[in-house]
Image (cartoon, rainbow, N blue to C red):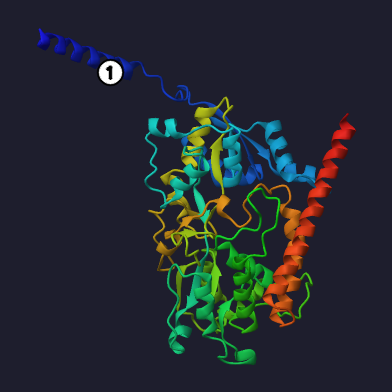
Amino acid sequence: MGGKWRLVLLLTLVAAMLGGCVGEKPVLEELGKDGKGKIKLVFDDEESFFRQYGDSFNVKYPDIEFEVVNLQELYWELQGKENVDHEAEWVKFLDKHKPDVLMIDLERMEKLVQEGKLYNLDAVIAQDKFDLEGYMPGLIDLLREQGGGSLYGLAPFFTTNVIYYNAGLFREHHIEPPRDKMSWQEVLELSNRFAGIGSGQDQIYGFDSSFGEPQELLFEVANASSLRLFDAAGEKLVFQTDGWKQMVRLTTDAIRNKALYALSLDEEDSGEDFSSIDEPFFQGKAAMIMGSPWFITQLRKRAVKDKEAKPIDWGMVTAPVDPASPDESSYASLYTVYAIAADSPNKRAAWEFVKFVNGPEMAKSISRTVSGELPTRNQFMKEIEGKSTEVFYALRPKGENESMWAGPNADILHPFYSEFRKILKKELKAVIANKKTVDEAVAAIQAEGEAVLRKIREEKKTRRLTTENGSQ
């Protein structure tokens, strides 16, 4: 009797499973037999959209139409307006046009996920067996982190910086070349070993600072650390700390000792284009420089354009890292995350587009050319100019919320940065010229920076009250 019941139970379970498989409704219905669909999205302009994506996509899906909303429309609306909350205007723009596909950065994706405005891709990815294994290490984990554990978007491209170095200069002066995963302190200490080699026009620098001015170098160095500019609430400046003092000392010492090439400290802002700041590296007078993949193209073009230029035996290592998280890079970032609006009536067509842009075909196509962008699928672009691309994919991108600018500060960052960098420039110059100690300069930066922060917040509060009173 027991055997009979076990057989009945087994047959019942098999029938239930088969019934579930046959009758299971797909997460997203397939496109109709005619393959027709429609996708609305926001892009810089219609022509560039079709050149980059639309034409290729329509070869595969000829009956899916695009409605491209020109992003320039938003810029035109904001032109000439002062004290405008750009983030709020962007949200209004999206609410007005209601695109099916959104092209956003990580920070905006996280915010829209929290507001329930994005479509969760996990189920449809599983249903379509979309390959997530072909992406660079850490990418999908990062997107899930920003999505609260789920995938709400995919990113086909990323950009990153690496350190390019002149191997010949290191050999000539018997100095060990840079290595992967160095901290900024190690990079500048290495750079300092070139200080005092040559003089005047023949001065050899350890590092060619394409950042230009002291405050920009400080931001770059601090960016690869765990430092923050604001407290967790985004209300107070937290510059007067041991960590920031260390960064100020590190960068000002490097400039004063001529361990790196930077703009003349006596030179005031003149609006001049300093695009030739990388000349010392090209002339063989700087041992290291930081740049994107596009710098490889510049190296090749330079050799073609200047026949008398001495060839550079160059190599690459990863950009400086935070010793606390040596497998992450603050210089690796996702240009654009492609997501689908939660209330889109065209989710299947939108998903086909997101899937296409993030698929192997697009990655393979991109891999044929070198620009500032790299495909996040790392199986196609193995070499550039005979050099392995492994260094570009060695570190995972660090999340936006781990940046030194992190915090609820989006509404004040632009005006604050504009004023704050002026304060930094003044005080850092004083330290480099030995007119102030690091402690004195940091105390002044803290006090003046807090005053700017209070002023911006008060002005914002006044504008809000004026707007509210005017609408009553």
Q: Quadrant of residue 124?
A: top left
Q: Does residue 133 lie above or below 14 as drawn?
A: below
Q: Residue at x 53, y 51 (%)?
A: 399
The quarter of the rendered structure image containing the N terminus is top left
Could you tell me residue 314's position as x and y percent? 46, 76
Residue 454, image x and y in percent? 79, 53
Q: Which residue is mark 1?
A: 17
Percent from the top left, x then y, of residue 371? 53, 59
Residue at x 70% of width, y 54% of height: 236
Q: Residues within 10 Å of mark 1 (few under 14, many from 20)?
A: few
Camera-side residue: 372 or 89?
Answer: 89
Q: Secondary structure at mark 1?
A: helix
Q: Is residue 232 left or right of residue 145?
A: right
Q: Nearer the viewer, residue 441 or 63?
A: 441
Residue ranking furthest to the bottom:
199
In the displayed structure, 419 sits above or below 138; it is below
- Residue 261 in the image, given as x and y percentages of width and height: 62, 79
Give the residue drawn at x 64%, y 39%. Answer: 42
Q: Along the horizontal axis of the image, is 265 left or right of 144?
A: right
Res. 306 visible in picture:
no
Q: Amino acid at mark 1?
A: Met
Q: Is residue 178 left or right of residue 448?
A: left
The residue nearer to you, when weighing 163 against 150, is 150
Figure check: 287 above or below 348:
below
Q: In which quadrant will I find the C terminus?
A: top right
Q: How many marks?
A: 1
Residue 235 horizontal side relative to residue 194, left or right: right
Residue 331, quarter of picture = bottom right
Whether residue 1 is visible to the viewer of this picture, yes or no, is yes
* Quarter where residue 294 is shown: bottom right
